[in-house]
Image (tube, grey):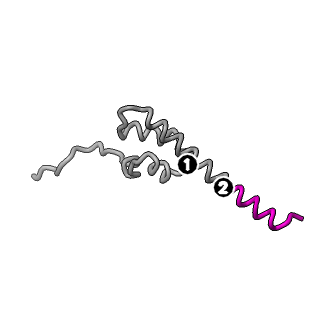
Amino acid sequence: MIDPQIRDLELENERLKKIIAKQALQIEIQSELLKKTPVGSKIKIVMLEKYQDKAPMRDLCNWIMLPRSSYYYKPSERKRGFKPSI
């Protein structure tokens, strides 16, 4: 039987490891973003797609400073404006 105090310490250790892994990923993403010199929305979206399996989209968008709506926006194929009246 495992001592409850040891079990609590193991759980705390796992929690801290997850926090450190998340921060390391954030630093990696932000440093890669700084290497790219014109940083536009398209470059940021490419980076989001690259790391989307490693962190939640909400966190990735916050780290890259890109609104989630910009990532999910899909332009319409229709013509802009009103249909002409008959």
Disc tally is: 2
Q: Residue at the far bottom: name it.
A: 4
Q: Residue at x 44, y 45 (%)?
A: 64
> Which numbered tag is attached to residue 55?
1
Residue 41 among magenta residues: no
Q: Nearer the viewer's eye, disc 1 or disc 2?
A: 2
Q: Observer-nearest residue: 66 or 6?
A: 6
Q: Secondary structure at mark 1?
A: loop
Residue 66, percent across and down?
39, 48
* Span colored in magenta: 1-14
Residue situated furthest left in the rendering: 86
Identify the residue at image location x=71%, y=60%. Answer: 12
Q: Residues within 10 Å of mark 2 (few under 14, many from 20)?
A: few
* Pointer 2 residue: 16
The image position of residue 26, as x and y in percent, is 53, 46
Tell me: 25 left or right of 74: right
Left or right of 40? Residue 18 is right
In the image, residue 4 lies in the stretch drawn in magenta: yes
Q: Residues within 10 Å of mark 1 (few under 14, many from 20)?
A: few
Q: Position of residue 15 (x, y in %)?
A: 67, 57
Main SS of residues in magenta: helix
Residue 11 x/y as whole percent: 73, 60
| Front in this rendered view, residue 24 or 55 | 24
Look at 76% across and 58% down and name the residue there. 10
**Which amino acid, mark 1?**
Ala
- Secondary structure found at label 2: helix
Nearer-N-terminus badge (1/2): 2
